[in-house]
């Protein structure tokens, strides 16, 4: 009913349109009311230097901040292999069971928090040494896309090591592992290599002009973008 009555429907990409088409065959998803909003991030926020989060301490940090489930077996294997690195994972508590929490607590270099305020995300991303994206199997639907999590780290020039994402992302500079052993290898390389640039036009993926274009299409006025 909402889809039928809405003045506008915002989709995150074309595959989403296909999902709605299959789920609701009686709705015409090619109707002009359906708009695709491209992925983008506030690039400037991730190119600034922010104060180091107190939680990070003084040791090297590998971090993931998100909502998608992660492969905790992989995270714990990394923590065992790289004892001199602290692994900070910020995801909702609902993604963890009691046994996993117990195993996390047994590792001195694995830290979980149930999420951080949105305005603190740039600080976490820009101050980590390696951005890890260790998705659990099947946890991310549109695996071929440069989604926000990757774009944030690219803007911050953080090396990215990912699991359960398409190997096609390698052409954009993302180190995508096919298995746990390869993840460990790519993780070691990322720690050695340090900050890097990516062959991606980040200016074209800046959220602010995307926001303005969508607002104009919907006949809205954006009063201000914030700081």
Image (cartoon, rainbow, N blue to C red):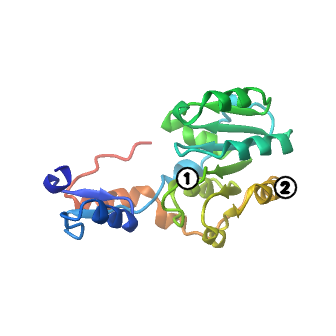
Q: Which mark is residue 177?
A: none
| Apparent side of residue 82 relative to residue 74 in the rendered image (left or right) | right
Q: Which of the two labelled residues, at mark 1 and mark 2, occupies the earlier sequence position?
A: 1
Q: Dot 2: within a 10 Å radius of its alpha carbon, few (fewer than 14), some, or many (20 or more) residues?
A: few
Q: Dot 1: within a 10 Å radius of its alpha carbon, few (fewer than 14), some, or many (20 or more) residues?
A: some
Q: Residue at x 54, y 67 (%)?
A: 144
Q: Which residue is mark 1?
A: 149
| Apparent side of residue 164 relative to residue 84 in the rendered image (left or right) | left
**Distance between the Cα atoms at labels 1 and 2?**
22 Å
Q: Residue at x 68, y 37 (%)?
A: 88
Q: Residue at x 38, y 59 (%)?
A: 12
> Looking at the image, which is closer to me, 64 or 193?
64
Is residue 49 visible in the rendered structure shown here?
no
| Apparent side of residue 153 relative to residue 4 in the rendered image (left or right) | right
Residue 217 picture location, percent across and down: 24, 63
Q: Secondary structure at mark 1?
A: helix
Residue 160 lies in what quarter of the image? bottom right
Q: Which mark is residue 192?
A: 2
| Apparent side of residue 50 relative to residue 75 in the rendered image (left or right) | left
Is residue 19 visible in the rendered structure shown here?
yes
């Amino acid at each position: 009913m909402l889809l039928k009555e809405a003045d506008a429907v915002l989709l995150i990409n074309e595959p989403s349109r296909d999902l709605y088409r299959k789920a609701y065959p009686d709705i015409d998803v090619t109707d002009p009311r359906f708009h695709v909003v491209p992925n983008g991030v506030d690039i400037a926020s991730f190119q600034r230097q922010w104060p180091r989060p107190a939680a990070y301490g003084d040791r090297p940090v590998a971090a993931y901040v998100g909502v998608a489930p992660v492969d905790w077996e992989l995270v714990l294997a990394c923590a065992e292999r790289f004892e001199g690195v602290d692994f900070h994972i910020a995801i909702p508590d609902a993604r963890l069971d009691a046994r996993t929490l117990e195993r996390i607590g047994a590792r001195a270099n694995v830290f979980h928090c149930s999420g951080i305020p949105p305005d603190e995300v740039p600080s976490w991303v820009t101050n980590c040494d390696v951005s890890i994206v260790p998705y659990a199997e099947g946890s991310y639907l549109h695996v071929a896309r440069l989604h926000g999590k990757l774009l944030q780290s690219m803007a911050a020039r953080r090396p990215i090591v990912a699991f359960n994402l398409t190997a096609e992302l390698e052409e954009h500079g993302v180190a995508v592992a096919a298995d746990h052993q390869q993840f460990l290898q790519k993780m070691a390389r990322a720690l050695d290599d340090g900050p890097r640039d990516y062959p991606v036009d980040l200016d074209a993926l800046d959220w602010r002009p995307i926001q303005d274009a969508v607002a104009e299409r919907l006949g809205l006025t954006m009063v201000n973008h914030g700081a």
